[in-house]
Amino acid sequence: MSQTFRGFRRPDGSVGVRNHVAVIPTSVTVGSIASKIAAEAGSWARATPHQMGTAQPEPAREQTVRVLRGVGRNPNVGAALVVELGTEEIDAEALADAIAETGKPVETASVRELGGTEASVDHGVKRLRALNEEVEATRREEADASELIFGVECGGSDATSGIAANPAVGNACDRLVDDGGTACFSETPEFIGAEHILADRCVTPEVRERLLDRVERRENMGSLMGVDLRGAQPTPGNQEGGLTTIEEKSLGAISKGGTTPVRGMVEYGEELPTGGGLVLMDTPGYDVESVVGKVAAGAQIIAFTTGRGSTTGNPIAPVIKVTGNPKTWDRMSNNMDVNASTIIEGDSLSEVGERMYDTLLETADGTPTEAERRRLEEFAINEIQSNELAVRGAQ
């Protein structure tokens, strides 16, 4: 029987699991103003302050625009206010138009034109409340699990991650793919040492070639910075958690994507297909940036596995925390949602995977995660570095 949930149907047919009104700054200069507008408007508002400046090299700017556009188009966003200082190279009106293509109400606000911070906050709060009056009329309706895009992430890994938390989330990914949905995992540096296994699962030679190319590119970028990624992994924190080699870490990391064929690999923040099966994304290993890439690509829900503990959340998508470490579950249970350590105590992978999938559907239905309850909402965009630009320019 097909699994269902109750979500917010958008004009373009996509389904949100939350009904946020987003405040999207085009640069770091107005990040604080965007946060203040959202804080004063109401608990339904979400700001996405980031670290990008008013001017960036073109490839970096294109990536920033792709992420901001994707965040505004994410089904969890019912309406958006784009805020600019007025000196940015990113065109706020064009960004708003790209978001409005989904049929959502979108407005812009320019701090220079409005007369500075105080006037902009007052204006922004009024506009945001007006937008929310349109959005709050939307009611949840039944939707199929095949309409879910599920992003998975890991951080603070230890020896329990690869034998409990990651396989449990991977089992939930398999269940979602079987039901017709999309699952996505990323962190390309954590494919290193296990890339040949992923390559053998690719459905076409083109996907296989792209995967291996992106792994090689990440290694080369590390070399440009004088870093041997194979030598730098596992991190000191991972080693304290019991991981001994990069292969051991990567084999555990890729298990969070499950066992189904790899049907594609997209760029950072590039739109993920609905009903696409298992699709990889090329992202850095930095958790917050990696999560934002998947949310910008359309993921409505994120699962985040951790052995040593993590408090990371996201302003747009609920983040389900999963740990396979019984000590972390005991010490940080107010940050965790799923206890996968019962696998170590004797529960089967299928039992815990089913529990994880049930939590995914309950979250889609509206049950808040622990990160949401505490408003843990980190947001950062991956920046293309100068050395990386040099490599791309030489290609």
Image (cartoon, rainbow, N blue to C red):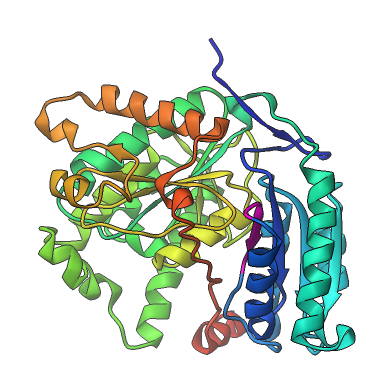
Image point 17% across, 46% down: which residue?
A: 330
Q: Residue at x 61, y 81 (%)?
A: 52
Horizontal side of residue 95 vs 280, given as left or right: right
Question: Residue at the spot x=54%, y=18% of the render?
Answer: 3
150 shown above or below 117? above
x%, y% of residue 271?
Answer: 66, 52
Residue 90 drawn in magenta? no
Q: Position of residue 15 (x, y in %)?
A: 69, 36
Q: Nearer the viewer, residue 264 or 146?
A: 146
Assess whether residue 47 is covered by the magenta stretch: yes
Q: From this viewpoint, which residue is outermost toward the top?
A: 1
Foreground: 26 or 149? 26
Residue span colored magenta: 43-48
- Image-quadrant location for residue 224: bottom left
- Nearer to me, 389 or 51: 51
Image position, residue 302 (x, y; %) = 48, 47
Find residue 26 and report its horizontal and vertical position in percent. 72, 76
> Vertical placement of 229 versus 160: above or below?
below
**Left or right: 347 in relation to 229:** left
Q: In terms of image quadrants, where is residue 172?
A: top left
Would you say residue 238 is visible in this rendering? yes
Image quarter where the C terminus lies is: bottom right
Position of 328 compared to 108: left or right? Answer: left
Identify whether 215 is placed above or below 275: below
Which of the 4 quarters of the picture holds residue 60? bottom right
Residue 141 appears left or right of 11: left
Is residue 68 shown to the viewer in this render?
Answer: no
Q: Which residue occupies 47% across, 62% down?
A: 290
